[in-house]
Each structure stands twice: as C-alpha cells, then as structure tokens.
Image (tube, helix red, strand yellow):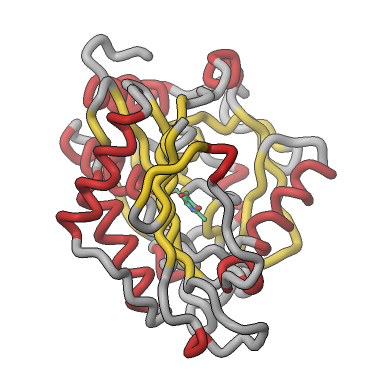
Amino acid sequence: QWIYMSGEYVKKEEAVISVYDHGFLYGDGVFEGIRVYEGNIFKLDEHLKRLYDSAKSIMLDIPYNKEDLEEIIAETVRRNQLETAYIRVVVSRGKGNLGLDPTSCANPRLVVIAEALALFPKELYERGVRLASVSSRRNRPDVLPPQVKSLNYLNNILVKMEANQAGVDEALMLNDQGYVTEGSADNIFIVKNGTIFTPPTYLGALEGITRNAIIDLAEEKGYKLKEQPFTRHDVYVADEVFLTGTAAEVIAVVEVDQRKIGDGKPGVVTNHLLSEFRKVTTTDGYK
Ligand code: PLP
C-alpha cells in the first residue's frame, strides 16, 4: 500500500510523522473522508471545498491548489489499484516547536491514504442501529465551528465511548440548548407524517456531504424536506430515523434511548433513500 506524504509516495510501514507535528501534539489540522465507488471518487469537489473551507477557518494554508490535490488523490487511488475504497486526506499544521503557537510550523503536511473499504455489515442495514443520547455536548459554533472538520475529534470520541458504555451502536449528540445535532460521525434525519426533517448545521453539526446528497435526492424524489431544529422528544416519536455519512451511507435507526422508533424496523422512506443513493453511486445499486 502506497501513501502520499508531502511530495512522495511511501510504503505504509514507512509512512511516519514527526512527534513535533502539531497535528500530533495538538490535533491542529483538518481532514476529509472520501469514498471511491467503482473507480469514481464520489463528490470529490464537495469534499475538497469543505477541506479548503475548514483550513481557511483555522488559518491553515494548504500548500496545494485544488487541481494538484485532485491529481494527488486520484494518483493515490491508482497506485493502490483500488476500485472500491476509502480515502483519508489529512492536512496538519506541520512540524514546529513544543509551544502551541502555529507560527513555529513552517510547512503544513499533506497525507493521502487510500485503502480497501471495510463495509458496514449487511445485517446492520437490515436490523438498523440503536442510539443513546449522551451527556457531552456538541461544541458551540462560536468556539470551534462544527462545520470545521478538524483533527480535534476528542469530543466525538468521548460520545462514541458513552455510546459503547450504554451498549448501543451510536451516540445522539445534542447542543447546549438540548437540540439534536448529529451522531459521532454522521448526520441525522427524522421522518414524521411523510415529511423529512434534519437539523440546520448552525445548531452544531458538520455539513455532511452525504447529508447534502440525501437532501437533494429526497427533493428530487418528491419528498417534503425541512431543515428545522428538533428535540429528543421529536426523535422518540418519529415514524423513522436514519443517519447519513460517508462510511454508513444511509442507515436506519430503530431504537433511541430505549424507545422503539416506529415499528422497530428500518422504515420505508429510509430504505427508499438508501436504494436511490446506491443507484447513484453504483451501477447495479449494490456493492
Ligand atoms: N458529522 C461528523 C462529526 C462527521 O465527522 C461526519 C463524517 O465525516 C459526518 C457528520 C458525515 O459527513 P459526510 O457525509 O461528509 O461523511
């Protein structure tokens, strides 16, 4: 496996980063997770836009233009001879001294990893996932904007740990006002009386690329969709709940805080959107 590291392709075993890199010392950097379906890099343009926006927000200069970055990513996939893959693009602040001031970091580092994708098990789509709301809150938009996909994922890790401790598959994160925001690495949607709802990202959610693709797809298929704040109660009494993300695509939620959602099985709208999404990404609708 070949990994791109600031100007060269190196073997996986040799792909190492300095302990003085501020990405390692402080989580100072940004990243993207991107999928390759049948040799096509899905929504690359949108992912790169988000990467540059995240970097701009934290004043990190990505030392490559968009065209160069596109070529590096495509070449990393080609070199590893991958058809179906997961790509991780990381830009860290680079090597500096031990102080947290980023002005000591002269050269931001770019790493591109492409590897065969470990798909979620099929059973998980058939049975759906269980969520528990967690005590950690999504960071406020006036502190570290949730739209920034930074390397600082401790908050998300903590909520994942809370979900593990509760014995469920995924966490339901709220903001400090109690509005539902997202999962640990997925956006959330609910369906009530035929209308689909998802929280506006300003409440404290990443603007997921899959989220946006599903919003477009739902509208194209004639569903009524509203970006509107909602609470845990709305989730409990929804007809359907589902999560979206690069890894999960669209996955049904069948239980939240021990309340059964709908009839406890993946819903009709969820299944419809998942199959339509797979029609867009793959030729036969399945992987
Ligand atoms: N929310 C968070 C916090 C994430 O890390 C991710 C995953 O990247 C998502 C939502 C889903 O976003 P996307 O659909 O772009 O993968």
Query: x, y percentage for residue 41?
Result: 26, 35
Is residue 33 in view?
no
Query: x, y percentage for residue 273?
Result: 33, 28
Is residue 230 in view?
yes
Q: Is residue 49 above or below residue 249?
A: below
Residue drawn 24% across the image and 42% down it: 43
Residue drawn 59% across the image and 38% down it: 13
Query: What is the quadrant of residue 114 in the picture?
Result: top left
Residue drawn 53% across the image and 74% down it: 95
Q: Who is closer to the viewer here, 179 or 89? A: 89
Split into 4 quadrants, where in the image is the C terminus?
Answer: top left
Q: Who is closer to the viewer here, 244 or 269? A: 244
Query: What is the quadrant of residue 276 in the picture?
Result: top left
Q: Who is closer to the viewer here, 192 or 169? A: 169
Query: What is the quadrant of residue 170 in the picture?
Result: top right
Residue drawn 16% across the image and 36% down it: 220
Q: Is residue 140 above or below residue 194?
A: below
Q: Is residue 114 above or below residue 109?
A: above
Q: Is residue 26 left or right of residue 242?
A: right
Outermost residue, top side: 284
Q: Who is closer to the viewer here, 287 or 115? A: 115
Outermost residue, right side: 165
Q: Is residue 113 left or right of residue 121?
A: left
Query: x, y percentage for residue 35?
Result: 36, 35
Query: x, y percentage for residue 238?
Result: 52, 40
How many tags in the picture? 0
